[in-house]
Image (cartoon, rainbow, N blue to C red):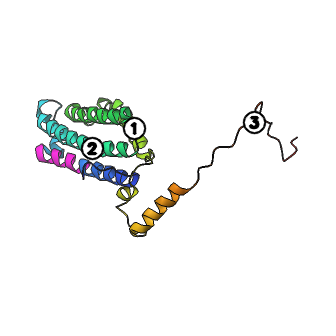
Amino acid sequence: MFTSNIGRLRFFLYSLGLAVAEAVVIVVCIVGTIGFEGLINSAPGPARQGMAGAVLIASLIFVALRGNFASRRSRDANGRRWILWAYIALSAVYALLQAGVLLVVKFGDPESIPGGLNLLALSIFGLWCTILWAKPVAGSNIDELTDVFDFDGPLPAPARTARAAAAAAAPRVPPAPQPFGRPRPAGFGKRGI
C-alpha cells in the first residue's frame, strides 16, 4: 500500500485528505493542551511550550506521510529527486516554524506575525504542483494508477495481449529526410506574399 505508484488524481485526493486531517489534529492539539482561550490570553513563552511541542510532533508525522505520497508520485512520473527532497525538507522547516510561531505570536498585535511563513508556504505549494502535474512515465502500470475508478471494467486478458501483439507487429516508419539548405519562408497561402 505504501510502496505502489500514485496517479495524479489519487495524489491530489490524498494530499487534500492529509491537509484536512492535519488541520483537525492541530486544532485537537491546541484544545487538548491549553485551549484556544488559553492560547489567546497567554503570554508568549513557557506557558505554550507543551502545545507547541504537540503541534510540532503532529506536523512532522504529517510531513512524513506527505513525503511518502510525494515520493510515490515522483517515482510514478520519474520526477527529479531534488524537487522531491526540496518539498520534504521545506515541509519539515515549515512545520518547525509553524510550531515556533504558535509559541511566540502575540494575539492582537499584527506585527508579531512573521510574513516569511507565507512565502515558504507558497514555495512548498509550487513544488507540490510540480510533483502533481508531472506526466507518468511510459512504463507505468495504467491498471495500478486507475484502480480507484472502474471506467469500463477490466479488459479481458486476450484483448490486452492482442493489443500488445498488434503494437509490436506494426512496422516502424523511418522519419522523412530533411532538405538541405535554408528552409523556405512561410508565406500567405501557397504562393506567399
Q: Nearer the viewer, residue 131 or 107?
A: 131
Alpha carbons under labels 1 and 2: distance apart: 15 Å
Q: Nearer the viewer, mark 3 or mark 2?
A: 3
Q: Residue at x 35, y 43 (%)?
A: 75
Q: Position of residue 176 (x, y in %)?
A: 69, 43
Q: For mark 2, does the 10 Å Cα neighbourhood hold few (<14), some (14 to 19), or many (20 or more) residues?
A: some
Q: Which residue is mark 3?
A: 179
The amino acid pointed to by label 2 is Asn
Question: Would residue 84 be found to the left or right of residue 165 on screen?
Answer: left
Q: For mark 3, does the 10 Å Cα neighbourhood hold few (<14), some (14 to 19), or many (20 or more) residues?
A: few
Q: Which residue is mark 2?
A: 68
Dividing the image into 4 quarters, which one contains the C terminus? top right
Q: Residue at x 27, y 44 (%)?
A: 68
Q: Give the extent of the magenta segment.
A: 23-33
**Label 1 SS:** helix
Q: Earlier in the sequence, mark 1 or mark 2?
A: 2
Q: Position of residue 140 (x, y in %)?
A: 40, 50
Instruction: From the image, give the main secondary structure of the stretch colored magenta.
Output: helix
Q: Position of residue 63 (x, y in %)?
A: 25, 40
The amino acid pointed to by label 1 is Leu
Question: Would residue 86 be found to the left or right of residue 168 on screen?
Answer: left
Query: Disc 1, disc 3: CB below 8 Å?
Result: no
Q: Residue 152 shows which numbered tag?
A: none
Alpha carbons under labels 1 and 3: distance apart: 43 Å
Give yes or no for residue 177 being in the magenta stretch: no
Q: Which residue is mark 1?
A: 127
Q: Earlier in the sequence, mark 1 or mark 3?
A: 1
